[in-house]
């Protein structure tokens, strides 16, 4: 079955950097989107950044110019480089995988979540 394994969360001071990684396995489709969402208690999960099979990226306005999402299609991994972190970036970050066949969406999967805390 499809599995997403995340790593790289933790505690960092404001202005610092963290790198999140997510490794996907258990599927053989070539067309899939990967990305990161985040959620704080009492709020909806929100998109942070995503990247398509073709390399097109989307970022939340709040993280533009600070975060960079990238993927490795051979390793089936997605990475989120987070720089200039702010306390408001504190959240549980979830890896997301969206599968497509023939251009049609067929399924979505989530990682277990990794805590990112930005605090002095």
Image (spheres, rainbow, N blue to C red):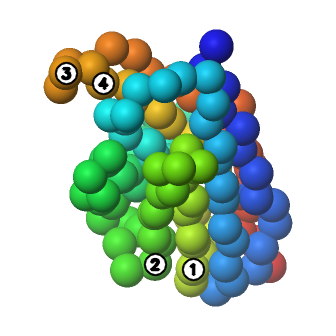
The residue wearing badge 3 is 102
Answer yes or no: is residue 20 visible: yes
Mark number, residue 100: 4
Q: CA distance from mark 3 to mark 1?
A: 36 Å
Disc 3 and disc 4 in contact, CB within 8 angstroms: yes
The residue wearing badge 1 is 83
Q: Nearer the viewer, residue 71 or 46?
A: 71
Residue depicted at x 69% and y 71%: 18
Left or right: residue 61 versus residue 77 is left
Residue 97: horizontal and vertical position, in percent?
47, 33
Disc 2 and disc 3 in contact, CB within 8 angstroms: no
Q: CA distance from mark 3 to mark 4?
A: 7 Å
Disc 1 and disc 2 in contact, CB within 8 angstroms: yes
Which badge, 3 or 1, is on the more N-terminal residue?
1
Residue depicted at x 57% and y 72%: 82
Q: CA distance from mark 1 to mark 4?
A: 31 Å
């Amino acid at each position: 079955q499809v599995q997403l394994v995340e790593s790289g969360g933790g505690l960092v001071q404001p202005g610092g950097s963290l790198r999140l990684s997510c490794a996907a396995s258990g599927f053989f489709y070539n067309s899939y989107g990967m990305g990161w969402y985040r959620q704080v208690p009492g709020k909806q999960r929100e998109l942070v950044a995503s990247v398509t099979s073709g390399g097109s990226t989307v970022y939340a306005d709040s993280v533009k110019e600070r975060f960079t999402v990238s993927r490795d299609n051979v390793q089936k991994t997605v990475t989120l480089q987070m720089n200039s972190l702010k306390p408001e970036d504190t959240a549980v970050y979830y890896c997301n995988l969206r599968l497509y066949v023939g251009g049609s969406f067929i399924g979505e999967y989530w990682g277990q979540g990794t805590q990112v805390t930005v605090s002095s």
